[in-house]
Amino acid sequence: MYAQVTNISIPATKIGEVRELITNKYFSSLKKRDGFVVAYFHEAIDDPTVIQIITYWKNQSMIEDARKTGSLQETIQMLTSHIPETRIKRQGYLVTITTDD
């Protein structure tokens, strides 16, 4: 399994707008992709300018294939063009230990 962690810094006044865009557009796009497992949207309770998205994929090649279509970038680019103060950092992880049987 493969996980991608996306940390996003936004203006505090924009959290509702960003939440709606991510949950309605980005997550909808993810669900259509082969190999997608699940996504989580985290809001920091002590800092309203920080959100985190964690997506899980069957393997790294499946997210790479999804990226090639450009559809995963579309929503993120829309976010940064609509809210220029947005900062995004991504990191990928190989998931080697789980509690699943």
Image (spheres, grey):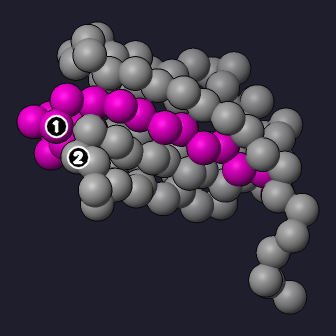
Look at 67% across and 35% down and name the residue there.
91
Q: Residue 21: within the magenta?
A: yes
Which residue is more in the foreground, 1 or 95? 95
Quarter of the figure with residue 81: top left
**Which residue type carries mark 2?**
Pro
Q: Position of residue 97 (x, y in %)?
A: 87, 70
The circle drawn on residue 66 is none
Labels 2 & 1 near each other (Cβ < 8 A): yes
Look at 79% across and 83% down and name the residue there.
100
- On the question of residue 40 being in view, the answer is yes
The circle drawn on residue 48 is 2
Q: Residue 88: within the magenta?
A: no
Q: Which residues are magenta?
A: 1-22
Q: Position of residue 1 (x, y in %)?
A: 82, 57
Circle 1: element type: helix
Q: Left or right of 79: which side holds 63?
A: right
Q: Residue furthest front?
A: 46
- On the question of residue 71 being in view, the answer is no
The circle drawn on residue 12 is 1
The 10 Å Cα crowd at callout 2, few under 14, some 14 to 19, many 20 or more, is some
Q: Residue furthest left?
A: 13
Q: Left or right of 36: which side holds 6?
A: left
Above/below status of 49 relative to 69: below
Look at 66% across and 43% down and name the residue there.
4
Q: Position of residue 15 (x, y in %)?
A: 19, 42
Above/below status of 9 relative to 2: above
Circle 2: element type: loop
Above/below status of 69 relative to 54: above
**Which residue type carries mark 1?**
Ala
Q: Earlier in the sequence, mark 2 or mark 1?
A: 1
